[in-house]
Structure formats: C-alpha cells, structure tokens
Amino acid sequence: MVSRRTIDDKFFAINAGRTNHNGIEVDLDYTFFETDKIKLISVISATKNDFKFKEFVDFDYDYSGNDLTGVPSEVINFGLDIIVDRGLYGNINFQEVARIPANDANTTFSDNYELLYSKIGFKNNFGKYLSYDLFFGMNNMLNTKYASQLQINARGFGSTAPRYFYPGLPFNVYVGININYNVF
C-alpha cells in the first residue's frame, strides 16, 4: 500500500503491487542435562527470509524484485537456560540480525548487529497462594550500537536528510520483583 495525496490535502492508499513471502523458520529446544536438582536447556531459533516485491510500481519507479522493506533476511537466536530445583534460574541469550532495507529502492540498509542478554533470578512460594520472583538482568552486554527501530521510506524536511534509524539502548541493567497471588 502506498499513500497518495489529493489536491485538497486528503490522503488515501492504493495497492501498488504484490509481494512474495518465502522463507524458513527453525526452532529447537533441547534439554541436554537433567537431574533431580538441575536442568540445562538450549534454545536455538533461526529465520531465513526471502521476502521480495513481486510487482511494485509507484509512479515512474519500479521496485519489482527488491527486498521487502523493513524485514531482515536472517535472524538467529541462541540461548542457554539453567533451572535449579530450589528456585534459582538463569539464562543467557545471543541474537544476530541481518541488515534491513529501509526504503523500497533498497538503497539504504540498517547495519547487521549482534546482541547479548542475561538474567538470573530466584522463584519461590509463600504458602499456597502467593509466589515471588526476584531477578537481575543485563541487556546489550556487548554495548552494540544498532538501530532498534526503522522509519520505513523516511522523508527529510527542508534541507535535512531523512531519519531512517532510531538507536537501540546501550548496555543496561535491571532488577525487579514479581509477586503473584493465585486464588485457584
């Protein structure tokens, strides 16, 4: 869908073409160590996208065959979870995201990036109805500079360049507690 503006400054959308969404996703969870006291679980997921404009003509511009705007060609996640019977748990997760086309012409792309996260916590119950979860975590442990949001087909105003990319958070830590009351 592309927008059009009428002479009296009203907007409407038209369908300018069609897309192909071919790809594959894989998600594997495997408990590779388990005893009465501890469990280690690995999680791997991967997505390979071949999303393209099958037909896309916008005025005099033909974007047919270009990569679909705003979609990475690959996303890979790997995680390791540990659960201890006394309520202690932890995990570490790694994510890799391929570059993303920011405009229909495929002339501007975000950079590919890698992120690393971790979290540890302790869960327990107070009696029959009350439970809690204390946790501490770290995000973007590699302090990667990346675009967490894209403005698709951004436009500049006046003499300014378009702003396609909005930065993701730098390395940060968090701490929290969840308290649950269950009546059932």
Image: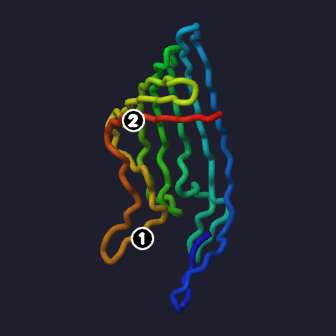
Tag on residue 155?
1
Q: Is residue 171 above or below residue 16?
A: above
Residue identified by numbered label 2? 176
Left or right: residue 101 compared with residue 183: left
For image coordinates 55% across by 45% down, the residue present is 73
Which residue lies at the image location 52% right of the left edge and 35% below the top edge? 180
Which comes sooner in the sequence, label 1 or label 2? 1
Residue closest to the eye, 116 or 85: 85
Q: Which residue is at the front of the view, 122 or 136?
A: 122
- Mark 2 is surrounded, within 10 Å at the Cα level, by few (under 14), some (14 to 19) or many (20 or more) other residues, namely few
Position of 52 relative to 124 (above/below): below
Total marks in image: 2
Q: Residue at x 53, y 92 (%)?
A: 8
Task: Identify the image quadrant of residue 138.
Answer: top left
Q: Along the horizontal axis of the image, is 41 left or right of 176? A: right
9 w.r.t. 75: above or below: below
Badge 1 crowding class, 10 Å Cα cut-off, few under 14, some 14 to 19, many 20 or more, is few
Which residue is more in the foreground, 156 or 44? Answer: 44
